[in-house]
Image (cartoon, rainbow, N blue to C red):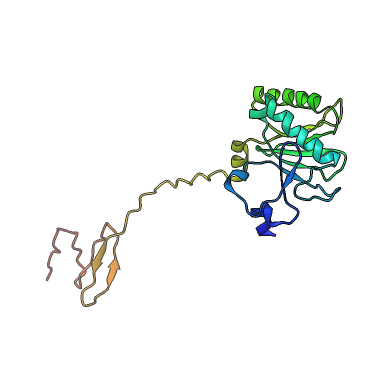
Amino acid sequence: SEKEISDPFASDAAFLVDARGVLMKQKKLLPEYLGLPLILGCSSEALEAGKVVESSEAKTALELLRLSARSFLQMRFQIREIDVSKGYCLLVTDKNHARVTFGFNDLEIQLRRLEQFLTYCDDSKQELGSVNLLVQRNIPVTFAEGPATVINDTIEPAVEPRVMKAIPVHAPETRLRQGSGGRETAPSAAKPRTDSRGSSQGNSHPRKKTD
């Protein structure tokens, strides 16, 4: 439920455990518990406050936490979660969401191999996505996309606006028509008009009168 996710101690199966494996029951989540790593999937034994965990999965998870805290990896690889539910390996997630699969044996050797991968990631400016340390050779490894790549893939590039070239438009002359409130359009060059006597206003020579 949402309550159990926000407060792990809301579950009856949730305990605090110290480095010796002693289980302690707490009724509420205190701020100092927020930074503690989680060990999940301890279903192979009955858990009870005051007792020591006996399963090999839980003991191996505690040993991995102890070894990683004492090595160079403490600053580079901070464990946030260990899932022991598989029964044959530890599925570990660190603070950067990298997923590392550990076998139950030779934890120190596996941590040294992990250190080599992390050094390579630092030198090549990459982020570790996942690595399976169960195998001795041809170790499967993936790299995560950097934050800048994720952002660039998420945001669509801006579309450049089209720039329309302005074309000058010359409006035709307008004049008022006598006796009406409307307008009429006239060309810029007026044609000569003829009066009732057939004379043209554009002709300056008068007609000769004959008997």
Residue drawn where x is 62% and y is 45% of the image? 33
- Residue 168 x, y percent position in the rendering: 35, 50
* Residue 126: % across, % down: 66, 29
Please say if 136 is above or below 1: above
Residue 173 lies in quadrant: bottom left
Relative to 190, residue 60 above or below: above
**x and y percent of residue 118 in the render?**
70, 26
Residue at the far front in the pictured view: 50
Picture coordinates of residue 38, whole percent (x, y): 71, 44
Q: In front here: 5 or 157?
A: 5
Classify the position of the C terminus by image quarter: bottom left
Would you identify the image quadrant in which residue 10 lies?
bottom right
Which image quarter is the N terminus in?
Answer: bottom right
**Quadrant of residue 103 within the rendered picture:** top right
Q: Nearer the viewer, residue 4 or 131?
A: 4
Could you tell me if residue 169 is visible in this image?
Answer: yes
Instruction: Please state if 192 lies on the left or on the right of 120 as rendered.
Output: left
Which residue shows up at 78% across the image and 46% down it?
51
* Residue at x-position 66% and y-position 41%: 36
Residue at the image position 81 percent from the left and 37 percent from the top? 59
> With 154 as the anchor, is 189 left or right in this view?
left
Q: How many marks?
A: 0
Left or right of 208 in this view: 181: right
169 relative position to 174: left or right:
right
Q: Is residue 142 visible?
A: no
